[in-house]
Image (spheres, helix red, strand yellow):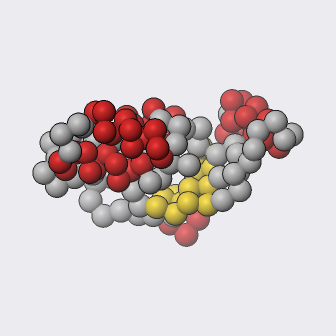
Amino acid sequence: MVAAYGPDFTQDFLAYASGNKRPNLSTTVSNSPNLTSKALTTQGYRPAGNPGGVALWVHPSGHEIQVLARSGPAPDEPAEAPGCGDADAGSDCLVDSDDEESCRQCCDDKYPDGGPCHAACRSGCADKL
């Protein structure tokens, strides 16, 4: 496991496996533009292959994310929301928050006037665990 995912991932996995942390044995399937390699890695996920053309990311908790192919920008380039001048709208909130509620609060704080950037930011929050 260390060779495939690294020592930090392995240590965190052992905490879940020993019962010190609560596992999350579920799978999310998404094509969200906020699920970039950088965002997933920051959240503790590691790439686990591309079975059937679907990028698979695993978390030490057991959670898996299957990232479907998107049309438009490459997976590491967030899509720009229509009318939003910030192509990264929401990526900071997605990475810096612990759950959907705190992600949405971050979006409300960062884009208090609403509008397309606020909507783009909040749309990515649905992918938070």
Q: Which residue is rendered at x = 69% and y = 30% of the image?
A: 8
Q: In front: 71, or 97?
A: 97
Can residue 113 be seen? yes
Q: Quadrant of the N terminus?
A: top right
Please report the residue visible at 42 percent of the width from the left and 41 percent of the height from the top: 103
Q: Where is residue 12 in the image (x, y as percent from the top left)?
A: 73, 34
Q: Residue furthest right?
A: 18
Kindly indicate the quadrant of the structure image that contains residue 60: top right
Most foreground residue, 75 or 118:
118
Percent from the top left, x then y, of residue 99? 52, 42
* Rendered residue at 31%/45% (across/down): 121
Badge count? 0
Instruction: Determine whether, in the image, residue 40 is placed left or right of residue 63.
Output: left
Please state if 107 lies on the left or on the right of 9 as rendered.
left
Residue 109 on image: x %, y %: 30, 33
Residue 71: % across, % down = 30, 64
Q: In this view, does 73 lie to the left or right of 47?
A: left
Q: For this rendering, which residue is in front, 112 or 45?
A: 112
Residue 70: quadrant of the picture = bottom left
**Up/down of 109 relative to 56, above or below:** above
Please indicate, yes or no, whether residue 50 appears anywhere in the rendered image: no
